[in-house]
Amino acid sequence: MPMIENEEKITRALLVSVDTGSFDAESSLAELEELVKSAGAEPVVCVLQKLPRPESATFVGSGKLEEIRSLCAMQEIDLIVADSELSPTQIKHIEDYTDVRVIDRTTLILDIFALRARSREGKLQVELAQLKYLLPRLTGKGVEMSRLGGGIGTRGPGETKMETDRRHIRRRMETLREELREVEKHRHMLRRRRQKDGVITCAIVGYTNAGKSTLMNTLTDAGVLAQDKLFATLDPTSRALKLPSGVSVMLIDTVGLVRRLPHHLVEAFRSTLEEAAQSDIIINLCDASGEEARMHLDVTNELLTSLGCGDRPIITVLNKCDLLDRQLMPQEFEACVKISAKTGEGIDRLLDAIEKNLPVRMRHVSLLIPFADAGVVSDIRAKGTLISEQYTAEGVRVEAVADEALYARLLPYSIERSHHGNDSQY
């Protein structure tokens, strides 16, 4: 199955959008450019036309279609990418007129997802989304919808499934759903185990390419793929993070968001996004150096609200602040945590914000535990955070962090620390 990056000739793409006024077409087209680059192609030229609504047969008007055909010939275009979802009729008419292969925004995103998915769950979700998109497009088309030949828009199961009938596709979709249900059961079991063990979870969410994987790597040395590409991370990654107070939290990296995300993908990746909804703390990470930082934050907040995260502490974090002129920063960003995941600037402030939003009141204690009660140390390891232990003639000296319940049980072993005063609260 060929991949664009390994081909000698880079696919040259023409991007086309119809501005109906229902969304910011120029910004969406700029994002489409990044998506095309992420798929491994080269966006050569962009065409934008203002219309009350897309033409039902050709998407763009006849004059603009003639302009596109001329540009394809002059610029040696291999692929036309529409910044909207096209009907089979529109694709056929544009291809017949320009003699250039055509895909739409949804096909492009599905292709990138197929390229990036690594885990079993990710691959199952991608295939299910592709088949959902394909199924209504098989009506009356037969093998005409085949995309055999390689290139963007042909990766994943689509190139073989397009040769099958609707009944076979529906059967395959049900099999995928059943497999996903099993994967989700396993995920729920892990989540319940974490809750039972008192593990605190912190999810990083945000617009795609905001720097979530880079932040994950900076905080935990997780080694998550971090590239300047949209959707570089598709599969959720979990790593332990020890805070300065000694408390450990489970940090979760999630798939990035994008404007006008096809509903096929929102539904297919909901279980991945629910990992964020079930977290104790949510980090809403935003690329502050981008021109649309405010909009990106709004998109993420809307999704979090739809997932029922209104009662969870959400920490708004502005990333890539090393690229930003602080004098020009909007007033509304003043209360946000400002960091650079790449340089490490502001990471201490982020860790402090996480500690302040921990779901339970944590206390740092200094203890002297007699050897006869050495089992208490095991309790601390199981239900608290053991910072240090030292064996002395009197017993085991311990530095630990405990929640209120464990702290009450440890009070009999507490050491009065004159140079610190009472136990400090975290």
Image (cartoon, grey):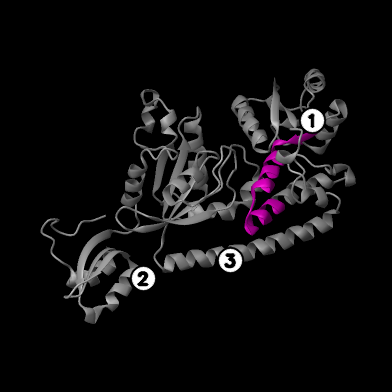
As drawn, the label of residue 78 is 1
Q: Are marks 2 and 1 in contact (CB under 8 Å)?
A: no
Magenta stretch holds residue 187: no
* Alpha carbon separation for disc pair 1 and 3: 44 Å
Q: Looking at the picture, how far across and down is residue 375, in whole percent? A: 29, 78
The chief SS type of the magenta part is: helix
The boundaries of the magenta stretch are 102-128
Q: Looking at the picture, how far across and down is residue 339, in whole percent? A: 39, 38
> Looking at this rendering, what residue extends furthest in the left direction?
418
Type of amino acid under label 3: Lys
Q: Are marks 1 and 3 in contact (CB under 8 Å)?
A: no
Disc nearer the start of the sequence (2/3): 3
Residue shown at 79%/47% (left/top)?
136
| Quadrant (top left/top right/bottom left/bottom right) for the C terminus | bottom left
Observer able to see residue 198: yes
Residue shown at 28%/75% (left/top)?
376
Q: Looking at the picture, how far across and down is residue 82, in whole percent? A: 72, 31
Type of amino acid under label 1: Asp
As drawn, the label of residue 185 is 3
Q: Looking at the picture, how far across and down is residue 192, in whole percent? A: 48, 67
Disc nearer the start of the sequence (1/3): 1
Observer able to see residue 52: no
Q: Secondary structure at mark 3?
A: helix
> Splitting the image into 4 quarters, where does residue 186 fall?
bottom right
Q: Secondary structure at mark 2?
A: helix
Disc nearer the start of the sequence (2/1): 1
> Splitting the image into 4 quarters, where does residue 347 fall?
top left
Closer-to-camera residue (59/372): 372
Q: Which residue is mark 2?
A: 382
